[in-house]
Amino acid sequence: MQVIEGPLRKNHDRWEEGGAASILRPFSTGHESRGTILSSEDTRPVRVRFAPSPTGKLHVGGARTAIYNWAFARAHKGTFILRIDDTDPTRSTEENTQVILRAMRWLGLDWDEGPDVGGPCGPYKQTDRLDTYRDAAQRLVSEGRAYYCFCSAEKLAADRKAAEERHDPFQGYQRSCRGIDPAEAQRRVDAGEPYTIRIKVPDGRGDVAIHDAVHGDVIFNARELDDFIIFRSDGTPTYNFATVVDDADMGITHVIRGDDHLSNTPRQVMVYEALGAPTPVFAHISMILGPDGKKLSKRHGATSVEEYRDAGYLPDAFVNYLALLGWALDGETTIIPRDVLAHEFSLDHVSKNPATFDPKKLDWIQGQYIQAMDTERFVFDVLMPELVEAGLEREADPTHPKAWYLLLADILKPRTTLAGDVVEKSRFLYEGDEVTFDERSVEKNLRGDYAPAALEAASRALSGVSEGSWHAASIDAALEPLPEALGTNKRKFYGAVRVAACGNQVSPPLGASLELLGRDTTLARIERALPLAR
Ligand code: GLU
């Protein structure tokens, strides 16, 4: 486990005190009131799924849903399934599917079953499962739980209008085809008449109560329940049908998803009942709002996981932050490494209130993860990839020995929030003798009368440090007496040397910077800067 000092200590202490087992709540007791567990007869092992529609990139909200499903599966020693809901052919693309898989991998949310890895309930892409939906719909028709409907769009519109005119509160499907004799309906289908398939909401079904693990009991009025379409006339299943067929087929025990799907749930319950499959526990998680209280969208800035990856966030920090959008460990701990999350996540700590996306908190958490990284990991996970990406280094053939990168990492880490921050702060080390001068820094630090003398004195003192003892400590020691000897103030003296050697006034600590730069390059750069100072 990665050890992070500070707020996290608390968790470690709890682990050490109680042992891992004692904080894992038994799955079969407690919390019934919010429906977080299956009914006592249902002893199935936990199986959850994340089912994105590949109609776009993986967004922050989807990523949080994926994290909750993943963490819930891990915390309950269950199975996490990734399923691609691509039944909307006009908006789903293979490219988006690949983008989503890449984002999931980057987040480190490994799936036990799904595309790429397969599994016993495959295929895991809805377009590859059309036969399953067709068979299920046919079975419901033959069992009298669903029926063929031949109503044209015009008839449906006319029925709706008539219901409106007579102020009927129910303006859904008038069940015109429900009474057609099944043999007659079959003859019409066989004769090629266009049809849809509708579910038959059982007479007297009554209200549908959903015991949502987040929202508590939600009751849907039976009158609202339509004999809705499960199969369209073009031979494709509707979302409410395909999803339930899959969830039932895949043995899903908990459906954790965005609360925009809460209103679909009573219909889905009808499908479970028709299929004779156990209804899972539902957990509908709240919306994510932008800082202005409106639903998080492009207007608020980056919304896709990729954008955060490219901006230089660490996947661990990003997962930690997203997990806290609507879930809390104990109300105060903010640094929750993924293994703690995977151990401690529970639905009864999920809030039903909308969560607000706070970029400042994300950056703060990111900073904590960066600072907690050990130097070597910082080199391999942050520094090198960024330098390679910026074209300053080649992965296979590093320019310097490992110790050089460790020293650079040591001085950059405290100055880094986003991974990309290291590039600009390292660039001066890759410019050979010809550093690029920052105009403002030159104006401020090299134009004073003291500057030529400062550079000459620094050059002399540094020439006295041999190649073999060219280390930050001896460099600092050689420079240290000079401001006083020259009668100039320290800030001015070091400013001049810094800009001469590093090109700007904001480089990392001077001794270490010059050590990294090397003796020859440092002396050559000071020499080249002299004319600027005179
Ligand atoms: N494909 C649906 C979506 O992306 C999934 C809904 C569900 O989890 O049932 O919103």
Image (cartoon, rainbow, N blue to C red):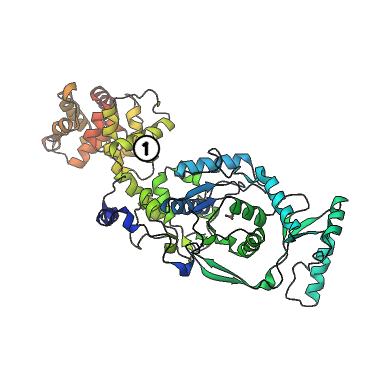
Image x and y of residue 54, in percent: 60, 46
- Residue found farthest to the front: 41
Quadrant housing residue 417: top left
Relative to residue 197, is residue 91 depicted above or below? Answer: above
Amino acid under label 1?
A: Val
Question: In the shown orientation, is residue 485 left or right of residue 4?
Answer: left
Relative to residue 85, is residue 377 depicted above or below? Answer: above
Q: Residue at x 70, y 68 (%)?
A: 202
> Which quarter of the figure is the N terminus placed in?
top left
> In the depicted view, which residue is nearer to us: 360 or 483?
360
> Which quarter of the figure is the C terminus placed in?
top left
Q: Which residue carries the number 1 mark?
A: 382
Image x and y of residue 229, in percent: 73, 59
Image x and y of residue 435, in percent: 34, 28
Question: In the shown orientation, is residue 92 left or right of residue 305?
Answer: right
Question: In the shown orientation, is residue 274 left or right of residue 518?
Answer: right
Q: Residue at x 28, y 37 (%)?
A: 375
